[in-house]
Image (cartoon, helix red, strand yellow):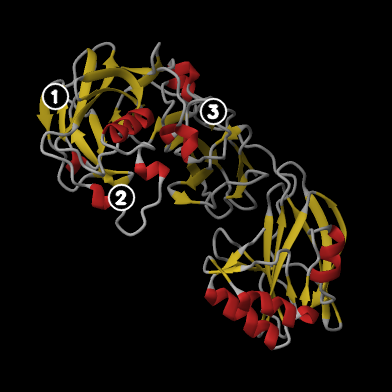
Amino acid sequence: MTETLDMATFNLLEKFVSAGGILIAFAEPFLIDGTSSEQLKEFFIKNSDRINKPGNLTGDVISNLFSSPEVAFSDVAGGTLYHHRRILSDGQLLFLVNSSTESSLTGSFKTKGADAIEMNTLTGEKYGYPNIQSGKEISCTFSLPPAGSLLLFIPKTGNEDLPVPAKPQNLNPVASASPLTVSRNEDNALMIDFCDLEIGKEIIKDLNNYDAADKVYKYYGFHNGNPWNTSVQFRTNTVDRDTFGVNTGFNATYHFTVKGKFDYTNIKAVIERPGMWTVSVNGTDVKPEDGKWWLDRSLSIFKIGNLVRTGDNTVTLKTTPMKIHAEIEPVYILGDFSVKPAEKGFIIEGPAPSFTLGSWKEQGLPFYSWGITYSREYNIETAEGSWEVGLGKWNGTVAEVSVNGQPATVIGFPPYKTDVSGLIKPGNNKIEVKVIGSLKNLLGPHHSRPTPGFVTPGSWRNVKGYPAGKDYQMMEYGLFEEFVLSH
């Protein structure tokens, strides 16, 4: 489906084919730098004997055009194998991937070389990898868990004689000497994505911030709405329109409800591009903290704890005159509190006395995107031998494991285990597993049943009304079963 090449790419292709290279083209582009090109057309005609046009990428095409006699795979079973091979002056890199997220993969390969060295892509360490030498070739077997990978360097000559790590066998769970403790590592957060918009002589309540921004820009002559979502900034086409009169602008007011009395002292608000606005909380103007930011340098922090009150609270952003960069975006409230679903969005309540296994969303942390640490202590008599920490049911991006404050390899892929041999000591050992969420729950999209993992500007459009908190789409992050130390 490629239609256009840039000139630099075309020059490289022309040089490659002129030197005798064979070009495999699944499409025949006709544009260079976006312009119709006779030069490109002539290139395909002139070099037709060195340009292969296989049509679709089928198994037969892969076998005929991309397989190499220098590496042969056999006995591949289970998941789906993909590989990348890179030839170097002193050997080759071979990267194997199991693209299945459900099935393990086994197999073997044979290639030219003198040794096999495993390169750990998580730690940067090198190990010896089991192989059988036969003349100028080696053969290796591999076993990859779902979504697993293996990176090998295969030298032409020589042998580094690196140790081959032993694979733990028949490890048994070790009983803990303490109950599980669970702690939140960062402030909790509430995201407010609806506001009351005051523009001209009109006040519109409970507008989603995406629609509110569109309404503002349309009011000031941008027929398609927010230009930063609907058009491309060619040179200065959009910013040159930053010529609004003195008596222009608008107010956007965000509401959040606090239920019950608890310590409000450290509650903060986060506002994007504070230089665009006059910011007030419950009618009192506030200024951002110097040099303080959250997530991104454009997101400034405002200390508002002394202004927060029980019941309804407001954060008002006012801009006058109107500014081209004055996009209406969500406002965030941070602090030591719980966030609970309400009839419209969410409310703030006092902090949870403790946390447990299970979904963060169900424990007052629906927008929380950082780490929750789960820890236990173990009394160990002898530390020799193999040790590993394994996870059962959990959901997050990665899990960081530490033993007595020393980090182990992170857990991110099946079989969800990490080797902690060498970190265990005789006596008391504290093991911590920190599950990390993602920004999906914080930043969205949350409405109109978005497809998880697929996001476009349109994912924030067409929000009908201010939904109840229970109707926001959230991921169920958390550790759902206790981790296990095995020996």
- Asked if residue 57 is positioned above or below residue 344 in the image, the reply reads below
Q: Total of numbered circles in the picture?
A: 3
Give the secondary structure at mark 2: loop
Quarter of the image that includes the C terminus = top right
Instruction: Determine whether, in the image, residue 246 is placed left or right of residue 364.
Output: left
The residue to which callout 3 is attached is 476
The label nearer to you, 1 versus 2, is: 2
What x and y, as percent, mark residue 288? Answer: 16, 39
Residue in front for this viewpoint, 376 or 231: 231
Residue at the image point whose x is 80% and y is 62% from the top: 55
What x and y, as percent, mark residue 228? Answer: 36, 44
| Inter-mark Cα distance, 1 to 2 | 40 Å
Q: Residue furthest bottom?
A: 19
Residue 363 seen: yes
Near mark 2 (Cα within 10 A), the count class, few <14, some 14-19 or many ≥20, is some
Residue at the image point whose x is 19% and y is 25% from the top: 200
Quarter of the image that includes the N terminus = bottom right
